[in-house]
Amino acid sequence: MVVESVESVEPVETADENGNLRAADGRVPGRRGRATRQKLLDCTAEMLRRTSYRSVKVIDIAREAGTSPATFYQYFADVEDAILVLAQEMALDSKGLVRIVGEGNWKGRAGYRTALELTDAFFGFWDQHRPVIRVVDLSAEEGDRRFRKIHLRLLNNVTVQLAETIKGIQAEGRNLGVDPLAQAGMLVATLANVANHQHSFESWGIQAPDVRISVARQV
């Protein structure tokens, strides 16, 4: 996992300077247009759950949404563009993970409860967004800078917040001698990796509750 400061990762814009969503042709869609755009996104996400994203075609998404390919192209340049929007929305949804780290009580037994909450949130987040995460990981690995930026934002925000929390713990005289960012990066990488493979543990005879407790104790 690559860790950079949050400031060094440029946000991917989905709106103009006034916060208005823009269609692929540059127009600002109205209420019906926004509803159509969202339906196309929902259908894209649903198709990603059923098949490889390389097999998803514009005509299939349009048919699923009850519209035409021409309508799809009013809002998105291609299938990848629609997936990119889903990935942007997913990255914004990760703010809930950051909130748990920043607002949680990390002292004593309360700290363990916070760790359980964060572990459950990671597992739930990965389950909810698994098809899009799969595309983001693959595209980032293949060198697509747009998806790589989203990949970094997804992990960096919670990593940086966790590093700040560890610094606060160190300031109280606990856990000395550990680099906060390195420790945070390791923990977030563990959370993400286990969340990504959480359902594979059962094939090894490991029960999901035991995985949850084990990860939370590391955190």
Image (cartoon, rainbow, N blue to C red):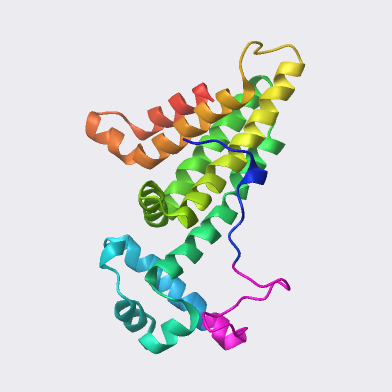
Q: Which residue is at 37% across, 67% downward?
A: 46
How would you classify the magenta stretch by its main secondary structure? loop
Q: Which residue is at 37% across, 51% downward?
A: 134
- Of the 4 image quadrants, the one containing the C terminus is top right
Could you say which quadrant of the image residue 11 lies in?
Answer: bottom right
Q: Which residue is at 43% across, 65% downward?
A: 83
Residue 137 vertical placement versus 160 (above, below): below
130 to the left or right of 186: left
**Residue 54: % across, % down:** 28, 63
52 to the left or right of 146: left
Q: Which of the pair 3/145 is nearer the observer?
A: 145
Could you say which quadrant of the image residue 78 lies in?
Answer: bottom left
157 to the left or right of 192: right
Q: Which of the pair 27/192 is nearer the observer?
A: 27
The span shown in magenta is: 14-35
Residue 7 drawn in magenta: no
Could you say which quadrant of the image residue 97 lies in?
Answer: top right
Residue 198 vertical placement versus 140 (above, below): above
**Residue 165: % across, % down:** 69, 28
Work out whether residue 205 can be spotted: yes
Residue 154 vertical placement versus 48 (above, below): above
Q: Which residue is at 47% across, 46% downward?
A: 124
